[in-house]
Amino acid sequence: MLNVIRSIRDGLAKTRKNIADKIGSLVLGEKIDETFLDELEVALISSDVGAQTTSLVLADLKERFKRDELGSPDQVRARLKTLLAEILASKTEGLKVTTTPFVILMVGVNGTGKTTTIGKLANRLNKDGKKVMLAAADTFRAAASEQLSIWGDRNDVPVIKHQEGADPGAVVFDAISAAKARNVDVLIVDTAGRLHTKSNLMDELKKVRRIIARELPGAPQETLLVLDATTGQNALSQARTFNESIGITGIVLTKLDGTPKGGMVFAITRELAIPVKFIGIGEGIDDLREFQAQEFIDALL
Amino acid sequence: MFDALTGKLETVFKKLRGRGVLKEEDVKEALREVRLVLLEADVNFKVVKEFIAKVQERSVGKEILTSLTPGQQVIKIVHEELMSLLGGTQSKLHLSPNPPTIIMMVGLQGSGKTTTSGKLARNFKKDGRKVLLVPADTRRPAAIEQLKTLAKQVGVDAFVSESSDPVAICRDAKAHAERSLFDVVILDTAGRLQIDEPLMDELRQIKASVKPSEVLFVADAMTGQEAVNIAEKFNADIGFDGVVLTKMDGDARGGAALSVKAVTGKPVKLVGMGEKLDALEPFFPDRMASRILGMGDVLTLIEKAQETVSREEAEKLAKKLRKNDFNLEDFRDQLRQVKKMGSLESIIGMIPGLNKQKMADVDMQQGEKELKRVEAIINSMTARERANHTLINGSRRARIARGSGTQVQDVNRLLKQFVEMQKMMKMMKGGKMKNLGRMMGGRMPF
């Protein structure tokens, strides 16, 4: 467990440094005033927390500052932590396989790390003793199904795939039949990355979801949106549109090992109340962790 | 793309436009808004700060007070500064005087290096060059497979190597390209985090070993504040010559474009506008700045029209117009040319005064469908019918409707509008090509 905290802390070290530097500089004689709050604003914004969430947080801090409740950097830090925790509060939950076959639909824009996340997720579930199957419904990108197959081999789990350019709906149809026939516990469906602004591609995704629901009532039990942690404010737009189209049950925040960011999850949980379920902190098969709000914030501040 | 930013700046400057005399406070207020807008657009906060300071310095004072229309003056200054921040002039790829030109792609995972490599290969091939695509990503599963597939789609060679060492692969590829007289070699390297020292070192070794004429840093247009640090590190460690901004067809405001240029001084050279292999466009800082300020992107539109409407076709059409024998066949050619220019949405995005917010209630998808339907109707006609629409009687109409999967009413409507269009063409007999655009855009019968 210590390792986990350490790797997340390492991953978030830069964010922490950034904000902590701002708060820490107070100790060196600066006092808490408008300039300080402006600096804090910059610190939050530079972590991609977003202008709106930042102004919300700052309004609270300013209010308390006026009421003389915040005299020291430590008090500011504590209050900030509480505020951020409140935003994420009760919006984190793990992934519980409640029925079989349990279908997880993975969606997101191009290049966020859907296929890699599936590889890691399959490994996790495998270790929990679940029988996993993967469906290569990304029939668009060149060699996407080969990429998924390699992850399938690494995890020793079957991959249902069609040819490139095939109908993704047909892939999921086959995958569900296969999952039922082979008593699979968890079926993870990989979909093609798509920009949320392309309505024809979003329609295709709706169709995939419809087919899953039709073939297996109650499925998909989880629809996970994979977000690249280096993404800025556009992440909110992505979450909003994917959620409207197919309903998102959770977020996977990837590439958190290279970036100090991820601040946009505050805006997303605040507006859409979608929990962050996992974070990706590396390219290794084990580099997928369950998201812990407190840990995330502790690492942040 | 920059629509939201444009919209907000427009609101800000509406206030300025309406006033005769401009005070320092007004400028400050407008710039405060501009600052927020830029921050929300993911422009790095440091870059924003410098930008605002510059604009403020230039706006407040003589320049603005002596101006007759102070609001416009501020817009002009913001526009100019934005333009210089974006890179001033358009930058092209360096081509080596001694082929092969070696282009090396670097960037984070998922930024779109492999797709961009495929698109670049297609562009060079279109220019008649012999291209070699080199998959040097030995880490991501099936990355090599992906590039090989793209090479096949584009119709260029992919370098096949048994080696698992990216440096050796690139070196061998260069030797092979020299022997086999390739014009352009594109090295697709593995995505990596800027903090991954061993991998950054690998890139340094590749660069030292093959000495590329162009190192392109591929950046996702959706990148947030971190864009600055990523770009700075890649530039400091490896050194790149230009930037490719990908996924610009989404709704990200693309503040990263401003940030990267500002901190590295390296220009954005190309822009990825979609997943298809032809969706790679040059980056024009001046147009982009205009676009941000709501002046539209007319030049790109004109250029697209030029590229798609070939000279001969245009001359043929002009001749037909003069002779008054514009028929359904010609009309179909025009439809196809419009289609070649891209989606309706992207065309409309380039027309000034028509921003996406205002066009929100116009269903583009529907428009595209209509275009397709119109083409289907014309396709269902015989060559004789296309040459002379007066032949088309009731039973022919019914047959055309069946053939195109439409209703007779649709056919009727198309024909009626076509006749109107013909009349209009008669009126502007002898009209020059400059009117073609207006006709294509404004008088489409659907």
Image (cartoon, coloured by chain):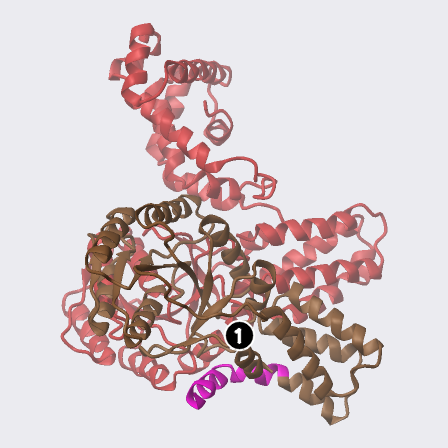
Chain colours: A brown, B red
| The N terminus of chain A sits in image quarter | bottom left
Q: Determine which quarter of the picture holds residue A112.
A: bottom left
Specify whether A291 is left or right of A82: left
| The C terminus of chain A sits in image quarter | bottom right
Task: Out of B398 and B16, give the one closest to the viewer.
Answer: B398
**Is residue B99 visible to us here?**
no
Where does label 1 land, which residue?
Answer: A261
Q: Within the magenta stretch, is there residue A13? A: yes
Provide residue B250's location: percent of width, then percent of height. 47, 53
Provide residue A86's location: percent of width, then percent of height. 64, 71
- Name the residue: 75% across, 80% down: A36
Specify whether B123 is left or right of A232: left
Q: Which structural element holds mark 1? A: loop
- Name the residue: 57% across, 45% down: B296
Q: Give the magenta range.
A: A1-19
**Is residue B422 visible to us here?**
yes
